[in-house]
């Protein structure tokens, strides 16, 4: 088993006033040749957007883009004609494929919106762009991992064009959970949203991350009131 530890304090950081963003991997003006990606996981941004502010219309191509709101309301509009609002308890996916443009704004003027922006390299190029969002709050299971993203359209959560699975693990009390990787050769990137987790010999706190590969199964100890995002991805681009 191989691991890479990314403490929260080691992330790139950009504060633009309207946007306060922490980058787990190289992004925009933050460039670290040792932090370009974890397998096909290219971007994991931890974003806070001020009231009424947001990202103006901009293009994407050949990328699977997943947004997970943590608090507040994020308004989405795109060139496919979608106009929606996502909030805590939702997950959104946009397959950029041959090309799509979109904007994202904080719908509320009087409060921040916090969300994770995740980019995954697709296994197929130039697919037809698509959009989807689902409410995952009803999928949540205490003291276990529950799936929010997969490669299969018929599975729980949203689907993307990659052999990637995402789960949220949460614990109301101290729990020892097992995670079995879905596909041989995949790795998994754990990102602590709240609380404290221990994976192998590594203890992780708020916004710490651990990438693990060359293993088939992991034992994870979640402390009380902990929530962890687990992103399983192919390690070969």
Image (spheres, rainbow, N blue to C red):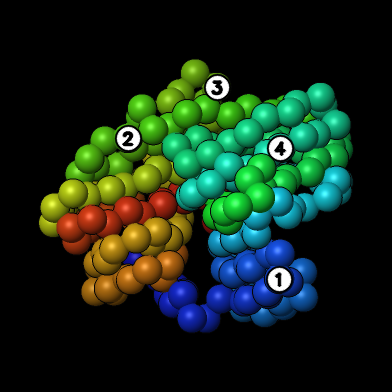
Image quadrant for the N terminus? bottom left
Discs 2/4, front: 4
Asked if the residue under mark 3 is in contact with the one under mark 2, i.e. CB atoms within 8 Å, the reply is no
Image quadrant for the C terminus? bottom right
Is 7 left or right of 57, judged from the image as shown?
left
Discs 4/3, front: 4
Q: First in sequence: mark 4 or mark 3?
A: 4
Q: First in sequence: mark 2 or mark 4?
A: 4
Q: State the separation of the CA atoms marked 1 and 3.
A: 38 Å
Residue 62's image quarter?
top right
> Which residue occupies the foreground of this view, 75 or 153?
75
Residue lying at 66% horizontally and 50% vertically, measured from the top left: 109
Q: State the separation of the CA atoms marked 2 and 4.
A: 24 Å
Discs 2/3, front: 2
Residue lying at 18% horizontally and 49% vertically, measured from the top left: 172
Q: First in sequence: mark 2 or mark 1?
A: 1
Asked if the residue under mark 3 is in contact with the one under mark 1, i.e. CB atoms within 8 Å, the reply is no
């Amino acid at each position: 088993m191989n691991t890479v530890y990314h403490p929260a304090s080691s992330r790139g950081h950009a504060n633009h006033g309207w946007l306060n963003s922490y980058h787990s991997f190289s992004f925009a003006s933050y460039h670290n040749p040792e932090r370009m990606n974890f397998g096909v996981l290219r971007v994991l941004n931890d974003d806070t957007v001020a009231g009424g502010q947001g990202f103006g219309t901009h293009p994407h191509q050949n990328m699977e883009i997943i947004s997970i709101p943590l608090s507040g309301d994020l308004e989405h509009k795109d060139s496919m004609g979608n106009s929606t609002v996502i909030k805590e308890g939702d997950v959104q996916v946009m397959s950029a494929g041959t090309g799509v443009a979109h904007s994202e704004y904080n719908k509320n003027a009087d409060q921040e919106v916090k969300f994770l922006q995740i980019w995954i390299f697709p296994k197929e190029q130039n697919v037809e762009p698509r959009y989807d969002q689902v409410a995952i709050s009803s999928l949540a299971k205490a003291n276990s991992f529950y799936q929010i993203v997969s490669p299969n359209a018929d599975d729980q959560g949203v689907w993307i064009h990659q052999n990637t699975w995402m789960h949220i693990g949460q614990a109301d009390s101290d729990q020892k959970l097992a995670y079995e990787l879905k596909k041989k050769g995949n790795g998994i990137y754990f990102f602590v949203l709240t609380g404290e987790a221990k994976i192998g010999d590594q203890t992780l706190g708020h916004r710490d991350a651990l990438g693990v590969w060359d293993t088939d199964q992991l034992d994870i100890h979640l402390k009380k009131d902990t929530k962890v995002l687990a992103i399983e991805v192919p390690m070969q681009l």
